[in-house]
Image (cartoon, grey):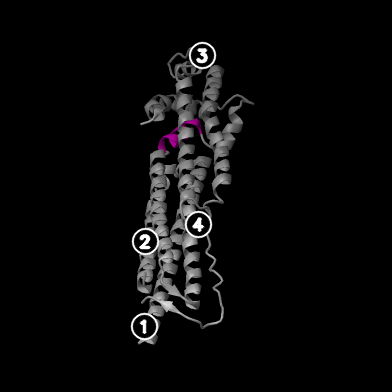
Amino acid sequence: MDALDRLAEVGQDLLRRVDATLVDRGAPPGDPIWPLLRQVGALPGDVLRFGLRLDERALRSTANEVRAVADRFTHEHRLLTAGIDAGTWEGTGAEAFASVWRSLTDHLGTTDDGPTICGRLVATGSYVDALADWIAGLRGELAEAIARVATSTEAVTVRSASRPRPDAPASAVVEAAARIGARFLQPAADAFTAVDDLRARWMGSVAELRYTPPAVPSGPVGGVTRVQL
Amino acid sequence: MRLDDLAARLEAAGDELAASSTTMSLIDPGAAVLAADAPGALGDLARDLHRELTTALTARGRESAAHGARLADTAQTLRLVAANYREADS
């Protein structure tokens, strides 16, 4: 349970009132909330519900599972590399086979390599971690928003509007709802930008890898062949 | 190391890669972890993110499966070569 989970109830209660005010009475003309509403395409309460359902831990677990596969493949790479060195086969056929073996082993790669199967797995693990970081960032921002606005003057104004005899005039309630709403919509708008950065950083590194077979040496057949059968 | 031992090593690696290609499809945590049924642009964003995640994981699975098959084919070729050498030797 993180800060957002702990503050969820307070935030949901407040944003239910904020959403109702925005839906019933709108927001002041020219208020900063308007472009945010257009960009995010959701109400502040929707943003909070969205944040609450994002599962950072599931993505961390996925990243670890991908890296575990990379570790197993690196082990296979080690065994294959040792295998070719231990081969007892000489001659034209052996040279051709060694070329294929090296190409297959190189394509498998290790966790330190880039454009290899293992390298792609490591990059995918890091990409999933970056997604989890994105979630953690948004959830943290939303938790901070709740903590900051829950006891603010605007929150008192919005809550007072539901009383039989409201303390504040209707325009003040609308302004307060818009200000609180913007505080929750801004992290969501920032999250859209962050996703663009995340894609620019990772999409190339996790694209599907193609295998290019080696040009097998085609020297004259013949000579001496030694092989351990 | 004998040719049959080399073939066995290739087969073992091929099996590991082929098995992991299935694992990759099971690793996908699902769209719900990204709140993909959220309304509006947030839901659109979440669905796009999950589709991209699935594409990356599927690519890893395909790479593993294809390379597993290459390793298995090479092992089979190597066994044939060993059999031919044995025949020539006898």
Tell which subunit mark 2 falls on: B
Residue beneath disc 1: B86
Quarter holding the C terminus of chain B is bottom left
Q: Amino acid at mark 3?
A: Ala
10 Å neighbourhood of mark 4: few (<14), some, or many (≥20)?
many
Residue beneath disc 4: A116
Q: Amino acid at mark 1?
A: Arg
10 Å neighbourhood of mark 1: few (<14), some, or many (≥20)?
few
Nearer the camera: disc 4 or disc 3: 4
Front-lying residue, A123 or B35: A123
Q: Secondary structure at mark 4?
A: loop
Label 1 – label 3 distance at C-alpha: 97 Å
Nearer the camera: disc 1 or disc 2: 1
Work out whether B1 lies above or below A151: below
Label 3 – label 2 distance at C-alpha: 69 Å
Residue beneath disc 2: B16
Image x and y of residue B24, in percent: 40, 55
Tell which subunit mark 3 falls on: A
Label 4 – label 1 distance at C-alpha: 36 Å
Residue beneath disc 3: A168
Q: Earlier in the sequence, mark 1 or mark 2?
A: 2
Label 2 – label 4 distance at C-alpha: 16 Å
| Bounds of the magenta segment | A43-53
Q: Are marks 1 and 3 on the same chain?
A: no
